Image (tube, rainbow, N blue to C red):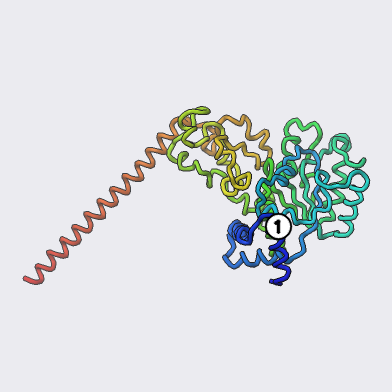
Amino acid sequence: MDKRVNDQFLEELNARGVSRREFLGFCAAVAASFALPGKAEAEIAKAVATKPKPTLVWLEFQDCCGNTESFLRAGQPSAAEIILDLLSIDYHETVMAAAGHRAEEALKKAVEENKGKFIAVVEGSIPTGAGGAYCTIGGRSALSIANEVCSQAGATIAIGTCASFGGLPAASPNPTGALSVAEAVPGLKNLINLSACPANAENLAALLVYWLTFDRWPDLDRYRRPLFAYGKSIHDNCERRAHFDSGQYVEQWGDPGHRRGYCLFKMGCKGPVTFQNCPNIRWNSGTNWPIGCGHPCLGCAEPNFWDSMAPYYNHLALDKTGAQPNIDKVGFWATLGLGGAFAAHAVAKIAGSKSRVIAESAASTSGKGEEA
């Protein structure tokens, strides 16, 4: 790594309150997220410190601005937030100084000068009803802007569930004809969905750093979400999973189980059918996350969650036939199964001990016979 460039970068981090150790820790965390070998940490650090930062064009359509808020929120700046801050964001209506015609000129310039190389980030669904009149910017429909910009981008990141799957605007009866980016602009190359309400800025940082380091995008799931962030269910990594396995559930808000951190399955948690890394990276600089705060997962990273996950505080069926089990019996059978496992282990231990005694006795008897 070029020492001068490296020193300049580290000076920039220090000026923003991030130490070299914290930066390398971030690089190690990114490497771990992708299950990369230890040497990848150095490659990531070198790429982040020396390679030109990609140009981003951030389009905001039919949404609540939650992903922008997630992107901007920085209590104590982390290395991930610094990485995002150092990107060349040439167009973002919420944060850019320019307005009106100058803002639109900035967008046009960024697209023309970086055609095929810039990254388009799209926040919010794209309404198609009434000829696109439900969302217009500078006299143009969101659909028209998305088609023009995304078709010329090197990659498009649909950030948040609205952009990824349509989200709340597309919920039945969908009066505005809201669509996801994939539906509104079909055939895009390198389309990546970062679903959730909102998406976590840590995942956006890791995604961009991976691309910056290896010049390719990570593996995706069937919904075009990166596997490093959406490869496992929330239930798999949940801190309350042991309580689920033991049949210990919160029965009502504020009860003793709730205060002890028992499983929120009975209160409607959708963790078993929701895929995201919330339990690992958490929110607010890793401080906490919804289930850690005592609220069940709503499944916001999944397609059509607004309709398919409702009613939010009703628990899921546990079997694959669609039949609703008696959740009160789940704990009993889980406990019984656990007890059975311990009993089987004890029987095996006793059987093993007896076998050893018999074998030793037989060997001893055989030995005495030979001596005689």
Q: Is residue 214 left or right of residue 21?
A: right
Report if residue 34 is visible in the image: no
Q: Position of residue 334 (x, y in %)?
A: 42, 38
Q: Residues within 10 Å of mark 1 (few under 14, many from 20)?
A: few
**Is residue 18 or residue 192 the one in the foreground?**
18
Residue projecting furthest to the front: 15
Report if residue 266 is visible in the image: yes
Image mark count: 1
**Is residue 279 or residue 190 the one in the foreground?**
279
Q: Is residue 101 left or right of residue 356?
A: right
Q: Position of residue 277 (x, y in %)?
A: 60, 48
Q: Position of residue 229 (x, y in %)?
A: 63, 51
Q: Secondary structure under badge 1?
A: helix
Residue holding disc 1: 15
Residue type, label 1: Ala
Whether residue 328 is situated above or below residue 195 in the rendered picture:
above
Residue at left offset 74%, top offset 48%: 158
Residue projecting furthest to the left: 372
Residue at left offset 81%, top offset 43%: 94
Quadrant position of the N terminus in the picture: bottom right
Q: Position of residue 283 (x, y in %)?
A: 62, 44
Whether residue 35 is situated above or below residue 98 in the rendered picture:
below
Residue at left offset 15%, top offset 60%: 361
Whether residue 53 is situated above or below residue 259 in the rendered picture:
below
Quadrant position of the C terminus in the picture: bottom left
